[in-house]
Amino acid sequence: MPSSGHTIDLLPAESAMLAALNFDPLDFKSDHDGFLRNADLAHRLTTSLLDRGGIPDHRIRHFTDPDYYPGGRGKSRQDSFTQHGNDHDETLRHPHFLKHLRYFIHGADLPAAALKSFSDAVEDCGMVTSGDIPELGAKARQLARSHGLEGSAAADQFFILSLDLGLSASNASRIRESGKQLRSR
């Protein structure tokens, strides 16, 4: 389970790899050797985390399970890589995999205040029921609006935060749908 905040615990060697890793593939547009080094680092870090079971199950399922990919039309995020001809190792080195690795390690990419406020709202519900979902969806929209976050991207981040907070994939998906109703201004 995540340690402080929603970041998972890392071994010292993994922390060193993370410190050297660049999550922005666009930084390597004109540096092919740098891209290859970064891709190998992403592969080694992911392999280490997977081998020791360091990634929470719901975060792995977010990548491998179609039920954790709302809008995926019955396919997982992993299936997208496979359909484009990538095997396991190629997937872990792919520049588009970096955002998934970032999520595996850090969780939702939201401002700290939004993370805390939404986490507190979920905690205040106690055991979350289907009746709590409309209120939590409204809270996600309000937080996205107040922090100037984009509708669809913010909705996806509240989906994965909901998973981190122990909500089912179906309830997290309903919060995501509510968040997608946010209009950009």
Image (cartoon, rainbow, N blue to C red):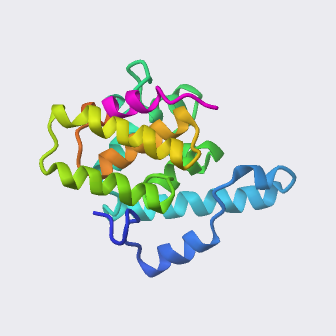
Query: Magenta residues, as a range?
Result: 173-185
Q: Is 180 colored magenta in this rendering? A: yes
Count of all numbered marks drawn on residues in the image: 0
Residue nearest the observer in this picture, 32 or 100: 100
139 sits to left or right of 80? left
Residue nearest the observer in this picture, 24 or 142: 142
Q: Is 179 colored magenta in this rendering? A: yes
Residue extending farthest to the bottom is 12
155 sits to left or right of 118? right
Asked if one can make out residue 138 in the rendered structure from this viewpoint, the answer is yes
Q: At x 50% / y 64%, what residue is drawn?
A: 45
Q: At x 32% / y 65%, what residue is drawn?
A: 2
Give the quarter of the figure containing the N terminus. Answer: bottom left
65 vs 92: above or below: above
Q: At x 36% / y 42%, what residue is drawn?
A: 139
Q: Measured from the top left, where is residue 158 in percent x and y? A: 41, 43
Residue nearest the observer in this picture, 106 or 82: 106
Asked if one can make out residue 50 in the rendered structure from this viewpoint, the answer is no
83 vs 99: above or below: above
Residue nearest the observer in this picture, 66 or 48: 66
Q: Measured from the top left, where is residue 147 in percent x and y? A: 54, 50
Q: Measured from the top left, where is residue 176 in percent x and y? A: 39, 33
Q: Quadrant of residue 151?
A: top right
Q: Measured from the top left, where is residue 125 in percent x and y? A: 17, 48
Q: At x 78% / y 55%, what residue is drawn?
A: 27
Give the quarter of the figure containing the C terminus. Answer: top right
